[in-house]
Image (spheres, rainbow, N blue to C red):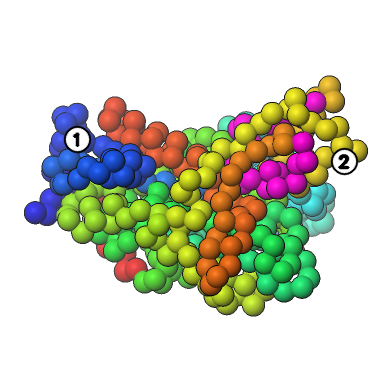
Amino acid sequence: MARSLSEIRAKADRSDAIVLTAQEVREILDEGEKLTLEDVDVVTSATRAVMSGTYAVLSFPAAPPATFLRARRARLNGVPAEVGPCPNERLGILDLIVFGTAHSRDDSKYGGGHLFRDLVEGKDVQVEVETDSGKAFEVDLTLSEMPSARLFGTRHSFKNYSAFVNPGEERVATIFHAALFEPCWNGASVSGCGHLNPVQNDPFLETIGVGTRVLINGAEGFVLGRGTRSSPEKPNLSGFADMHGMDPEYMGGFNTSSGPECVTSWAVPIPVLSERVLESVAVPDRSIPLPVMDVVERKEVGRTTYGDVWEDVDLEVGFSPETCKRCTQCIPEAICPTGAIGFRDWRPTLDPKRCFNCGLCTTSCIGDVFRAHLGSLRFGGREVPIVVRQSDRLRAERLAEELKSRILEGSFKMTEMAERISP
């Protein structure tokens, strides 16, 4: 029995809709219960991960009219911006595009993702401008002084991703690891939130289409269509949202051994329109394939499932500062990809709003200040320990819960797609 979105929206408007998160669906099924179309109307899905294909389009006044003819170059907190596309001749207004993977001229550990979070946190950002006549000026601005600020994704929310290992004999700098990737199969990097991922819950894109309303970093936005490098086997989405409504905890920068990357979060409602959609949301992590790739050769060297990544593991990093051994140099602090670890009065601190729960600190702390069971990948007769997670399942679950609450209280309205997306 197929249903329509208008039927489900009408139930939501009457506060009669049954809304479950993807995690709640999993828990119900794991308890041996069955789900039918009568048991659930909407499943909220989410992912939070390093997403390279992120950029911001900003437009704001930087100087009084007639101050300069056009801008030639611009930087925000040292991060280079592309000037244009509008010339804004003599208006004193800048139109800028900033890539999430752009690197600061002044700080090798600061990039576009860090800048986007600083803006959303309301911090002052230093804007440096070089005009076409060669003159330069600076101005400090906040997001509230930028009338237009939108975040776009060229390829986000992959159905699921891959794990990476380094079978070679040399350490490797890569965007797929927050530190140098140790050789000889000594660790694995993983990405993808498994059964929580939006497109995993709608792999045939029956409910997600052009114009579908979603949450990006907690702000309402829309799906634009298929993302770049999307394929039937690994579909992904493009979309955008207004930065003014975003939550900084769902976004930010993530430092890798090959430079800063950008963290982005998506939450997508999946109306359960048919039995096929219901079957998709019921797939457990252990049934979702996970290719294992050679990080250098970029070829598949094995295959496992997301059960190795997310079943019987700790989603959150435990913190016990009293066990600190007072090392001369704190390795976890040095390699933390989000700068969440620090020291105050000679005691370690952990900023829970910046911690990504990647788990890398747990592999290097001799005092067990940071603890988490990350699991191992098992494939081809090997068992390779997971040493860094580039997806944050804990916050993805929280974002799915937030979307559920918004639907139930009526503040988030699901939209009919304008057009189907071809996977």
Outermost residue, left direction? 1
Residue 199 is inside the magenta segment: no
Majority secondary structure of the magenta segment?
loop
* Residue on which the image places disc 1: 17
Where the C terminus falls, by quadrant?
Answer: bottom left
> What residue range appears in magenta?
347-367
Query: Which quadrant, please, contains the N terminus?
Result: bottom left
Q: Residue at 25% across / 59% down in the picture? A: 206
Residue at 13% over, 50% down:
3
How far from the left and from the top, in percent, is residue 330?
A: 82, 40
Q: Can residue 359 be seen here?
A: yes
Query: For this view, does 273 lie left or right of residue 310?
Result: left
Contact? badges 2 and 1 (CB < 8 Å): no
For the point 51% across and 53% down, which residue is it?
309
Of the two numbered discs 2 and 1 in the rendering, the one whose residue sits closer to the viewer: 2
Residue 329: assigned label: 2
Distance (Cα) linking label 2 and label 1? 54 Å
Q: Residue at x 59, y 51 (%)?
A: 389
Name the element at disc 2. loop
Residue 242, can we see it?
no
- Mark 1 residue element: loop
**As drawn, is 277 to the left or to the right of 185?**
left
